[in-house]
Image (cartoon, rainbow, N blue to C red):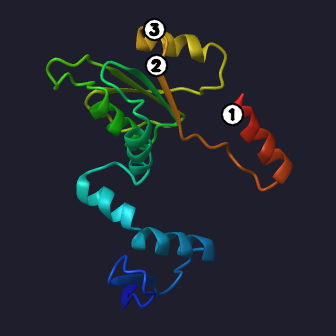
């Protein structure tokens, strides 16, 4: 399926590069995505460190810089699958209460699909755009959220104007 070749780009990221030999019924775009995944240093790091996905490093970097995930915070993660951001939030807000002397936070993940359970986080299948969703979130959290994180993406259809309107609807 794949072969490893020396990385001669001079970037020094990795010694080997995985190339997918054949498409085997996949579209070219799928083959390219697979090759990027196989060579992505963050994908490898996430796998090695037990993170749910490479996106966890985005939120780690942002929180290291802006310090918004503080112990005791109530956090909502919109579009939470696969749960990488929630995984970081659980640790940073002390959702498990493992840091004595620090307030215990809450982490609530919302997605259209089910998310594998995570200790310290509560996941619900919910369309955030549905009527009454905000009230349900407040009830589940026990009050208003201190932090709202979102990695949601609108379903795209390939029609630029329609896709743009769907993205803007998420922003509202």
Single out the mark in the foreground, 2 or 1: 2
Which residue bears the numbered disc 3? 143
Q: CA distance from mark 3 to mark 2?
A: 9 Å
Whole-percent x, y for residue 133 in the image: 59, 17
Residue at 34 percent of width and 48 percent of height: 52
Q: Position of residue 8 (x, y in %)?
A: 42, 91
**Which residue is under mark 2?**
146
Q: Residues within 10 Å of mark 3 (few under 14, many from 20)?
A: few
The quarter of the picture where residue 32 lies is bottom right
Residue under numbered circle 1: 170
Of the residues under marks 2 and 1, which one precedes in the sequence?
Answer: 2
Judging from the image, what secondary structure is the residue with disc 3 in?
A: loop
In this view, the residue in front, 138 or 89, is 89
- Disc 1 or 3, which lies upstream in sequence? 3
Query: From the viewer's perspective, is 82 left or right of 31?
Result: left
How many neighbours does mark 1 have within 10 angstroms: few (below 14), some (14-19), or many (20 or more)? few
Q: Position of residue 135 (x, y in %)?
A: 56, 10
Q: Position of residue 168 (x, y in %)?
A: 75, 37
Quarter in which the N terminus is drawn: bottom left
The residue sitting at 39% across, 83% down in the picture is: 17
**Quadrant position of the C terminus in the picture:** top right
């Amino acid at each position: 399926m794949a072969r490893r070749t020396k990385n001669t780009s001079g970037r020094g990221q990795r010694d080997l590069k995985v190339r997918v030999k054949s498409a085997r019924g996949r579209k070219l775009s799928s083959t390219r995505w697979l090759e990027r995944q196989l060579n992505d240093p963050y994908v490898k790091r996430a796998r090695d460190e037990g993170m749910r996905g490479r996106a966890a490093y985005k939120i780690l970097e942002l929180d290291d810089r802006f310090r918004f995930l503080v112990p005791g915070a109530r956090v909502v993660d919109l579009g939470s699958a696969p749960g990488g951001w929630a995984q970081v939030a659980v640790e940073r807000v002390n959702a498990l209460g493992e840091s004595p002397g620090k307030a215990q936070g809450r982490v609530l993940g919302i997605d259209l699909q089910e998310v594998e359970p995570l200790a310290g986080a509560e996941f619900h299948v919910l369309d955030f755009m549905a009527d009454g969703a905000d009230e349900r979130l407040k009830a589940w959290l026990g009050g208003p959220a201190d932090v709202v994180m979102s990695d949601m993406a609108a379903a795209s259809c390939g029609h630029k104007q329609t896709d743009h309107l769907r993205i803007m609807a998420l922003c509202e």
